Image (tube, helix red, strand yellow):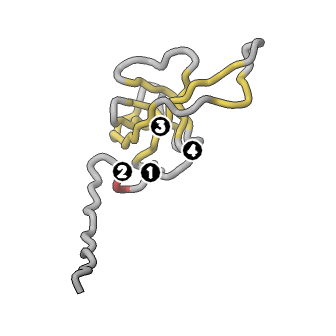
Amino acid sequence: MSHPQSYEILVIPQFSDAKGADASGTGRTIRSAVVTATGATGESGYPRYAGEGMVADIDPATHTVEAILVDGSELDYGLTARISEQPVPDNHVPGNHVPETSVPENNTDG
């Protein structure tokens, strides 16, 4: 089975109501990172992705972050990791440099 080569992971505060149930909304993204496939399988059994200080095991079928370390530590309580719904452009994936095309400047000297 082919797995995506990269994802953008979003770290978001997850709010709960007074009874401990998840509230309807989440906070704004406090950190994000583009992670790329390492070719390894994590301890969770899912493919491992790494980049920009994050190492995550991601279920490619459900796009769920099954395990994550941020700067070598587990997430603090109240934070959740999600996959961005926007696809990662190739030029934002580390190691995939897409050269910029040069655009000639308009000469206004007449």
Callout 2: helix, strand or loop?
Answer: helix
State the mark number for residue 61. 4
x, y percent for residue 91: 34, 55
Q: Residue at x 27, y 55 (%)?
A: 97
Task: Report the Cα–Cα distance between label 4 and label 3.
Answer: 16 Å
Residue farthest toward the right in the current orientation of the protein: 19
Q: CA distance from mark 3 to mark 2?
A: 13 Å
Q: Residue at x 33, y 39 (%)?
A: 38
Query: In the image, what residue type sits under mark 3?
Result: Ile
Q: In terms of sequence position, does the residue under pointer 3 or pointer 1 come before the other?
A: 3
Amino acid at pointer 1: Val
Marks 2 and 1: in contact by CB < 8 Å?
A: yes
Task: State the residue in front, 79 or 38.
Answer: 79
What residue would you read off at disc 1?
A: 88
Which amino acid is tagged 4?
Answer: Ala
* Image point (39%, 40%), residue name: 35
Mark 1: few/some/many CA within 10 Å (<14, 14-19, 20+): some
Q: Give the secondary structure at mark 1.
A: loop
Mark 2, residue position: 92
Query: In the picture, residue 52 is in which quadrant?
Result: top left
Mark 4: give few (<14), some (14-19) or many (20+) Cα within 10 Å. few
Relative height, residue 52 to residue 74 (above, below):
below
Tag 3 residue? 9
